[in-house]
Image (cartoon, rainbow, N blue to C red):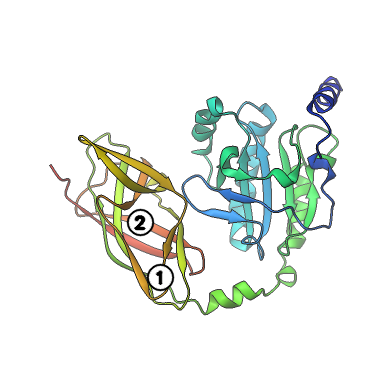
């Protein structure tokens, strides 16, 4: 009760902008764009055809921390059937390192608030908050309506998710038809550098070939040996140090190719589980805007002195 009174006072001080509880049930989800940690971009449009659970949280929020293992359980159980869970971290910049550390324990994608365009959801001043969206982009559950401050109970989420994942609920969209006819991106000359003992970062180079008639883009990558993978571009050299810039996607022109090479674009493997040893391989899954994901086992070459 005291917490509810506190939040009411906070809401009064924040002004008259629309609140997230005003989201209409059985209405289209507001537009959003999420530039995910580790690479990749998700929008309301790109999630059509998936059941999506948008989860707003913060690292300082005790109920949020308690809810994360339950979300991981849902993700592991239902992701293969079409459920996407995306965690939207609302931490201030000084708390974001704590959020990054927490998310190393989970496999569903997430985004920092400064990389998330979610203004159309309204003001979000209570967390955790889960919003369940069906395959057609319609809001089916809004945890703001929950009776307590811990969001929707797991049993309620399960009751809402299960029917939305049934085969009869899955529309055949135009984008899905297009994807079925999109040629697979070809991978040439993949290579990873061996790493020294204790080194937590590695790098992958390769060439992406697009045989299709339309532009595509590399939007993300993941590997079982790395906590996350970032797409970087080397911008300039400052003495012996390279200045690198994080990019969220890399365009591959129709009937063209893009090469990731030293001094240019590359995939940075961060939080390595173990050193990369010459003669072994790095398992790598690449994700594209239009084409199907591609798996490649990247050969590891000797460490350059």
Q: Position of residue 256 (x, y in %)?
A: 36, 72
Q: Quadrant of residue 110?
A: top right
Q: Position of residue 169 (x, y in %)?
A: 74, 68
**In the rendered image, is residue 48 in sight?**
yes
Task: Judge by depth and name the residue closer to the eye, 170 or 94.
Answer: 94
Looking at the image, is mark 1 or mark 2 nearer the viewer? 1
SS for dot 2: strand
SS for dot 1: loop
Decide: marks 1, 2 in contact (CB < 8 A)? Answer: no
Left or right of 294 in this view: 289: right
Q: Which mark is residue 235?
A: none
Residue found at the far left of this picture: 305
Left or right of 227 in this view: 137: right
Q: Which mark is residue 185?
A: 1
**In the rendered image, is residue 208 in sight?**
no
Q: Residues within 10 Å of mark 2 (few under 14, many from 20)?
A: some
Quadrant containing the N terminus is top right
N-terminal label among 1 and 2: 1
Q: Quadrant of residue 284?
A: bottom left
Task: Judge by depth and name the residue closer to the eye, 213 or 129.
Answer: 213
User: Which residue shows up at 58% across the image and 61% down it?
Assistant: 80
Answer above or below: position of 59 versus 187.
above
Give the Cα distance between marks 1 and 2.
Answer: 17 Å
Answer above or below: position of 73 versus 51.
above
Task: Judge by depth and name the residue closer to the eye, 109 or 7.
Answer: 7
User: Which residue shows up at 60% across the image and 31% down it?
Assistant: 91
Q: Quadrant of residue 152?
A: top right
Q: Which mark is residue 283?
A: 2
Left or right of 290 in this view: 43: right
User: Which residue shows up at 81% across the image and 25% down it?
Assistant: 7
Q: Position of residue 106 (x, y in %)?
A: 53, 42
Quadrant containing the C terminus is top left
């Amino acid at each position: 009760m005291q917490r509810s009174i506190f939040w009411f006072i906070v809401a009064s001080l924040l002004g008259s902008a629309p609140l997230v509880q005003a989201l209409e049930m059985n209405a289209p989800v507001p537009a959003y764009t999420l530039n995910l940690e580790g690479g990749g971009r998700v929008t309301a449009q790109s999630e059509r055809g998936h059941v999506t659970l948008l989860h707003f949280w913060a690292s300082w929020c005790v109920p949020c921390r308690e809810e994360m293992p339950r979300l991981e359980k849902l993700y592991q159980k239902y992701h293969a059937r079409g459920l996407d869970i995306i965690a939207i971290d609302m931490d201030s910049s000084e708390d974001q390192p704590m959020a990054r550390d927490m998310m190393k324990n989970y496999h569903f994608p997430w985004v920092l608030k400064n990389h998330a365009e979610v203004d159309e959801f309204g003001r979000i001043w209570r967390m955790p908050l889960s919003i369940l969206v069906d395959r057609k982009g319609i809001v089916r559950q809004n945890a703001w309506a929950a009776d307590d401050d811990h969001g929707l109970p797991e049993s309620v989420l399960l009751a809402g998710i299960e029917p939305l994942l049934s085969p009869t609920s899955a529309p055949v969209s135009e984008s899905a038809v297009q994807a079925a006819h999109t040629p697979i991106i070809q991978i040439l000359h993949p290579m990873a550098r061996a790493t020294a003992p204790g080194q937590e970062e590695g790098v992958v180079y390769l060439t992406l070939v697009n045989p299709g008639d339309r532009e595509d883009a590399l939007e993300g990558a993941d590997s079982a040996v790395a906590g996350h993978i970032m797409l970087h571009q080397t911008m300039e050299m400052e003495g012996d140090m390279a200045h690198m810039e994080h990019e969220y996607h890399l365009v591959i022109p129709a009937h063209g190719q893009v090469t990731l090479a030293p001094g240019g674009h590359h995939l940075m493997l961060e939080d390595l589980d173990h050193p990369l040893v010459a003669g072994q391989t790095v398992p790598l899954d690449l994700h594209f805007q239009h084409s199907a994901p591609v798996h490649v086992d990247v050969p590891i070459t000797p460490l350059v002195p």
